[in-house]
Amino acid sequence: MSVRLPGPLPDLPCNAEGPVFAEPWQAQAFALTVALHEGGCFAWTEWADYLSQAIREAQAAGDPDLGNTYYQHWLAALERLLLDKGIVEPLKLTGLRQAWRIAAERTPHGQPIVLGAAARAMRR
């Protein structure tokens, strides 16, 4: 299946059919970003600027840029953009990040991570 992107992205891992994801969360972060753009939350050029900045900051902090951390930069850029635009509240984002970390630690390897009811309620 081919994915058509609204514009260019720096260093997006792709093959002949489109973006490549090593983990399900990467595909989800990608899809969320595209959906938010399509919903008018931000321009694609604005998104690309945030992603480029996240990559530059990671490289300046010592990221060897081997490609395996690309979606970590993607997620950092998305969080920063949503915070800067006031789309998410800092405390809510922190709480959700913590809930996902706890859920991941409690989930057996190979099983889907499921948030508890309280964490799901925070997403609203």
Image: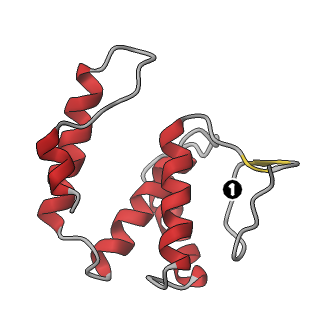
In the displayed structure, would residue 80 be above or below residue 94? below
Query: In screen coordinates, is 41 left or right of 91?
Result: right
Quadrant, the C terminus = bottom left
Residue appearing at x 34%, y 14% in the figure: 108
Locate residue 23 relative to residue 13 in the image: left or right: left
Indicate the position of residue 97 as horizontal and vertical percent values: 24, 47
- Is 8 placed above or below 108 here? below
Name the residue carrying label 1. Answer: 12
Q: Which amino acid does label 1 sit on?
A: Leu
Measuring from the top left, give residue 6's x and y in whole percent: 69, 76
Instruction: Pick the residue in front: 5 or 12.
Output: 5
Percent x, y of residue 117: 15, 41
Task: Identify the element where label 1 is drawn.
Answer: loop
Where is residue 29? Give x, y as percent: 48, 54
Can you say whether 97 is above or below 6 in the image?
above
x 47%, y 42%: residue:
25
How many labels sit on residues?
1
Identify which residue is drawn at 29% across, 28% down.
Answer: 104
Position of residue 29 in the picture relative to residue 103 (left or right)? right
Q: In this view, does 19 lie above or below 21?
A: below
Report the side of 19 relative to 53 (left or right): right
